[in-house]
């Protein structure tokens, strides 16, 4: 009965997978209890139906759109102070110990983050979103991912690097992308739909759809259609 209830809740939340019959009932009950506590905490922090983990801070929640069944796991910091609305689509998940920094310096109000439906990042992800980050639908990512949507200028030798300002081209990921662990996305990079980014890659260019990307710096290794 518990398993049937859990499966119905999964289906209602938009999850398409079938529960493994070997999953013990004790595990299901513990997950349900944890989710109940998280949704109560989310309502207290944001006034909305959001699943929020222990010791997670949400700043300026009024500037954040939460879709259905959004999960922000434990020990996260979500900075909602941005010039554009922060958007978490339906069934988005942010892994534990992750940080969203929308405004990194008082000299410039940052743009923030937009994250599409059914997209998720693992633990210890850093969103440096001052220059803007856009992530499409169905993007799945491992742990220790970092986004740096600004880059320091350094071409004027008469000035200190810290005095030369930054570029803010932003970062854009399309739909249906798999990103391995410990990938770094740099300002100005664009990854097309239906692509795979290998673990440890440093992504700093513009990559077409259906690409398998890897390396430091990252390059197209082959097509996902092959």
Image (spheres, grey):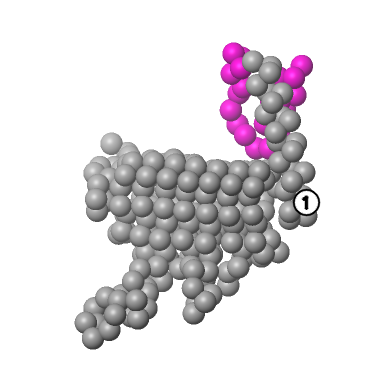
Give the residues drawn in magenta, as a range: 1-23
Residue 62 on image: x %, y %: 71, 64
Q: How many C-alpha atoms fall within 10 Å of the one at disc 1: few (<14), some, or many (≥20)?
A: few
Residue at 24%, 50% in the rendered image: 216
- Tell me the quarter of the image containing the C terminus: top left
Name the quarter where the N terminus is drawn.
top right
Q: Is residue 135 magenta?
A: no
Q: Is residue 19 magenta?
A: yes
Front residue of 121/98: it is 98
x and y percentages locating residue 215 in the rendered image: 25, 47
**Residue sitting at the far left:** 157
In the structure shown, which secondary structural element does the residue marked by tag 1 occupy? Answer: helix
Picture layout, residue 39 above or below residue 77: above
Instruction: Farthest residue to the top: give it.
Output: 22
Q: Residue 110 location in percent, x, y?
A: 52, 71
Q: Is residue 152 above or below residue 219?
A: below
In the picture as drawn, the residue positioned furthest to the bottom comes out as: 158
* Residue in front for this viewpoint, 127 or 135: 127
Residue at screen point 34% across, 76% down: 162
- Tally the numbered discs: 1
The relative height of residue 157 versus residue 226 in the rendered view (above or below) is: below
Q: Residue at x 37, y 78 (%)?
A: 165
User: In x, y percent, where is residue 109?
Assistant: 53, 75
**Horizontal relation, residue 181 to residue 50: left or right:** left
Residue 106 versus residue 49 in the image, above or below:
below
The answer to which image quadrant residue 14 occupies is top right
Residue at the disc numbered 1: 44
Q: Residue at x 62, y 22 (%)?
A: 19
> Can I make out residue 117 in this image?
no
- Nearer to us in this view, 160 or 52: 160
Residue 159 visible within the image: yes
């Amino acid at each position: 009965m518990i398993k049937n209830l859990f499966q119905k809740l999964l289906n209602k939340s938009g999850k398409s997978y079938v529960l493994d019959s070997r999953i013990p009932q004790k595990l299901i009950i513990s997950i349900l209890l944890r989710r109940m506590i998280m949704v109560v905490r989310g309502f207290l922090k944001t006034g909305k139906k959001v699943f929020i983990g222990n010791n997670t801070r949400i700043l300026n929640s009024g500037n954040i759109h939460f879709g259905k069944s959004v999960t922000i796991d434990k020990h996260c910091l979500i900075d909602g102070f941005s010039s554009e609305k922060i958007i978490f689509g339906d069934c988005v998940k942010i892994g534990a110990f992750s940080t969203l920094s929308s405004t990194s310096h008082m000299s410039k109000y940052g743009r923030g983050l937009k994250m599409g439906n059914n997209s998720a990042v693992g633990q210890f992800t850093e969103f440096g979103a001052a220059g803007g980050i856009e992530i499409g639908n169905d993007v799945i990512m491992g742990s220790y991912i970092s986004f740096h949507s600004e880059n320091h200028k350094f071409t004027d030798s008469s000035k200190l690097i810290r005095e030369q300002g930054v570029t803010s081209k932003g970062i854009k990921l399309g739909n249906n992308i798999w990103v391995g662990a410990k990938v770094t996305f740099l300002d100005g990079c664009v990854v097309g739909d239906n692509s795979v980014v290998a673990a440890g890659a440093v992504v700093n260019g513009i990559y077409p759809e259906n690409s398998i990307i890897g390396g430091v710096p990252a390059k197209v290794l082959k097509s996902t259609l092959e």
